[in-house]
Amino acid sequence: MSQVQVVTKSETELTKEKNTFKKVISKLGPLLALIILVVILTSLSDKFLTINNLMNIASQSSINALLGIGMLLAILTAGIDLSVGAILAVSIMIMGIVTVNMHMNPIIGIIVCLGVGTFFGWINGILLTKLHLPHPFISTLGTQFIGRGIALIVTAAAPIAGFPLMIQFAGNQFVGPIPVSFLLVIVVYVIFHIFLTRTKTGRYIYAIGGNPEAARLSGIKVDRVLMIVYSLSGLMAGLAGLVMVGRVNSAFPLAGLNYESDAIAAVIIGGASFFGGVGTVSGTLIGALTIAVLRNGLNLLNVSADSQMAVIGIVIIAAVYVDVIRQRRAKKK
């Protein structure tokens, strides 16, 4: 009898160990994929694993990382924000009018850029919660066209160049070899990690994504939380625009075109679920770095831009498929 109990206990422990191992692999999956990608590209190009190139990757990933953290919030609530690229464009165009054309203080220009982004995000929240549009896909798609149209109208489709040095700082300065833009990303990600894991609103975001009706019945003000989510997504689009202007010292109305695709890809590659309630800040950063590493490596290997798009598309489909499999296994349990 005691021998049978020992065997049973041993089998239970083995099952627990297997489940623990699966959970660890699931959490570390995006990071392992990034490490494998780095190893492969290092073996294929001797220019890849150099300080200059790694800092170039960090700089290239910054804009997508900032857009991705806002997108993460939307996807955690089982939503999406298709307007981030257009919000980026309209934010920097209005900032350009204020600082370059009207010669106003750069600090006012920065506030305007972030404020316009937040305002458009707030509009997305209003459309979703007050007008009760069926899905954020609809509301943010509409805002995408509105934002892009305004960006073209206010400047007659002309670019604006010659921004003050203060506005360029975040996009083109370095602390030693490290780009200021990537240091900004680290600060932003630490803040959002604390926000999502240490505040009530952060926990509410996960709860809404897990089960919005249960969240509502438990007393969570779902509409208020969604307003915060989309406003923050707009704010991050404005901040990403500020970094972009710093990098190229110009603003143009078609800036950020299709950037929402990369932001979505970063979130999903980082382990978040389209079904909501699952995702981490660190995973999103890994996703943004993965896309930047992949693009950089393909450039070093002289792969055409068209082929790069196809490769990114395959990676996105693979990441979504992994998410689907994960959800199926969770339902079986």
Image (cartoon, helix red, strand yellow):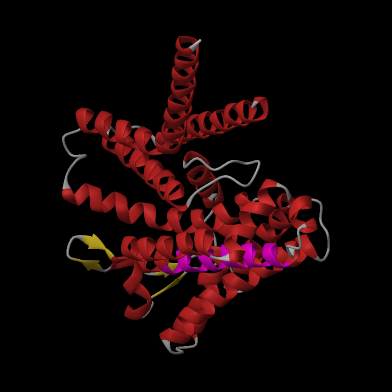
Question: Residue 172: where, in percent of width, then height?
Answer: 29, 67
Residue shown at 23%/60% (left/top)?
178
Instruction: Indicate left or right for 282 with 80 as reference.
Output: left
Q: Residue at x 62, y 53 (%)?
A: 206
Residue 75 left/right relative to 312? right
Query: In this view of the protein, can residue 77 be seen by the observer?
Result: no
In the image, residue 215 sits, relative to residue 238, either above or below, namely above
* Residue 106 falls in image quadrant: bottom left
Give the magenta-colored segment's residue range.
224-242
Determine whether, in the image, residue 192 is placed left or right of residue 168: right
- Place of residue 51 in the rendered image (x, y in percent of width and height, measured from the top left): 17, 49
Residue at 67% over, 29% down: 331
Residue 16 on image: x %, y %: 47, 27
Residue 278 is a magenta residue: no
- The tally of labels here is 0
Q: Is residue 71 above or below residue 296?
A: below
Q: Is residue 7 above or below residue 40?
A: above
Q: Mark yes or no: residue 290 visible.
A: yes
Left or right of residue 331: residue 237: left
Report the residue at 51% width, 10% height from top: 1
**Quadrant in which the C terminus appears:** top right
Is residue 188 or residue 262 the one in the foreground?
188
Question: Looking at the image, which is closer to me, 305 or 45?
Answer: 45
Per the picture, the main secondary structure of the magenta-coloured stretch is helix
Residue 225 in magenta?
yes
Percent across and percent down for residue 66 are 46, 59
